Image (cartoon, rainbow, N blue to C red):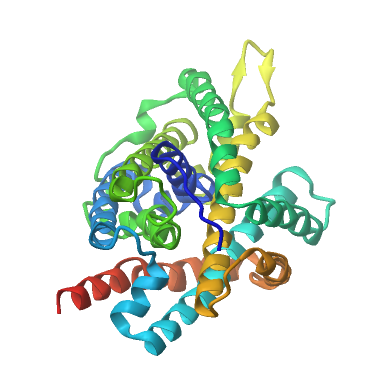
């Protein structure tokens, strides 16, 4: 397998874009649905919980700076148990990770922008872009992220500033109207999308970093940037749209962009703002898919992952078409399956590996 090395700066940028990912579209609705106008408090609690989870995940990276999650699993569980755990991990990850996000962006496009376009067309076109990026390798993805990240920040900051005149502070009151009980479930919902999936990055880092011993610092920085963006989006959706509208809307952050209206001249620019969602979603899917391709190649002792990318891409596209038969199924799956699944792979698995390391 060719040696891949990326810089700490690139690690931070990739981690930030991965953290934001699809969360920028769906997290405001999910957290507000549970905590109402206190969703911003739940996000703060979630960020605190997220960094505790990251600390557990990254302790393993600090103990084994040259070893990724797949190799570490085989080392601590033993070869055959480790390979079985890795295979089940990657199989479930394919279904719940890139396939889910690819369906999410296709749903978003057909609902909000291209209602006459078949969802299959968007899935295959966007999937082809992901396959191309992953086949070119992590270094190319990292350089692309460096180029696109400033544009993402520009669009995000522009949207935030242009919405300041639309803020209604009364939308955030009363604080703790339902008490503190909804805060923890909402925080866990936030963490399940924004932080627990970071376990996937352990398949890529720290072995692919030019200074592996310091990779964990870059992951912390990227996660903090991503969490800050998500916190801002949640706050803006509540203050501008109100908690009821935010909770009812599937994509409240897109609805935010529709609210921009400067002097009846600068308006209806949500299509331009959608570019920043395409950027984060692309890197979320690509890193998921790259990790799966790397993991499969290591399970079967294949030296080069690249021949696996196209076949896995066809499987990804096919699964993405059928993974959610309808919206109620998706909502129920997110509520009852996604959270326990991410807790299992994102917290219990690294905690178990850490305990095995101590034995």
Q: Is residue 131 left or right of residue 117?
A: left
Q: Does residue 100 appear anywhere in the picture?
A: yes
Instruction: Determine if residue 332 is in view.
Output: no
> Based on the displayed image, in which of its 4 quarters is residue 330 positioned?
bottom right
Query: For residue 261, what is the image quadrant?
Result: top right
Residue nearest the observer in this picture, 187 or 166: 187
Residue depicted at x 56% and y 38%: 143
User: In this view, which residue lies farthest toward the right?
Assistant: 116
Image location of residue 286, percent across then percent down = 59, 54
* 267, above or below 207, in the image: above
299, 201: nearer the viewer? 299
Q: Is residue 323 above or below residue 235?
A: below
Up-down: is 237 above or below 31? above
Q: Where does the N terminus fall, quadrant-wise?
A: bottom right
- In the picture as drawn, the residue positioned furthest to the bottom comes out as 80
**Quadrant where the C terminus lies?**
bottom left
């Amino acid at each position: 397998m060719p040696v891949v090395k990326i810089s700490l700066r690139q690690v931070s940028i990739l981690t930030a874009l991965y953290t934001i990912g699809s969360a920028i579209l769906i997290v405001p609705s999910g957290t507000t649905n549970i905590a109402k106008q206190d969703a911003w408090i739940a996000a703060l609690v979630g960020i605190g919980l997220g960094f505790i989870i990251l600390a557990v995940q990254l302790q393993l990276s600090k103990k084994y700076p040259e070893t990724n999650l797949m190799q570490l699993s085989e080392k601590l569980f033993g070869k055959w148990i480790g390979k079985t755990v890795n295979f089940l991990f990657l199989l479930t990850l394919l279904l719940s990770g890139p396939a889910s996000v690819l369906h999410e962006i296709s749903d978003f496009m057909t609902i909000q922008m291209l209602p006459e376009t078949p969802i299959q067309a968007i899935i295959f076109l966007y999937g082809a872009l992901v396959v191309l990026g992953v086949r070119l390798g992590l270094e190319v993805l990292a350089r692309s992220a460096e180029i696109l990240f400033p544009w993402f920040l520009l669009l995000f900051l522009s949207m935030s500033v242009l919405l300041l005149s639309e803020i209604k502070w009364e939308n955030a009151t009363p604080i703790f109207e339902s008490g503190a009980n909804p805060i923890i479930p909402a925080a866990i919902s936030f963490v399940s999308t924004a932080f627990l999936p970071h376990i996937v990055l352990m398949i890529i880092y720290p072995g692919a970093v030019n200074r592996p011993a310091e990779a964990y610092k870059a992951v912390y920085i990227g996660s903090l940037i991503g969490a800050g963006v998500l916190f801002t989006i949640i706050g803006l959706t509540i203050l501008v749209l109100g908690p009821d509208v935010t909770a009812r809307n599937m994509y409240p952050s897109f609805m935010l962009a529709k609210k921009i209206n400067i002097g009846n001249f600068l308006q209806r620019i949500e299509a331009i703002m959608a570019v920043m969602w395409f950027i984060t979603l692309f890197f979320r899917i690509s890193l998921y898919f790259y990790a799966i391709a790397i993991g499969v190649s290591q399970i079967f002792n294949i030296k080069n992952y690249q021949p696996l990318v196209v076949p896995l891409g066809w499987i990804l596209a096919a699964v993405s078409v059928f993974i959610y038969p309808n919206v109620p199924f998706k909502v129920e799956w997110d509520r009852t399956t996604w959270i326990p699944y991410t807790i299992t792979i994102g917290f219990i698995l690294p905690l178990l590996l850490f305990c095995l390391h101590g034995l």
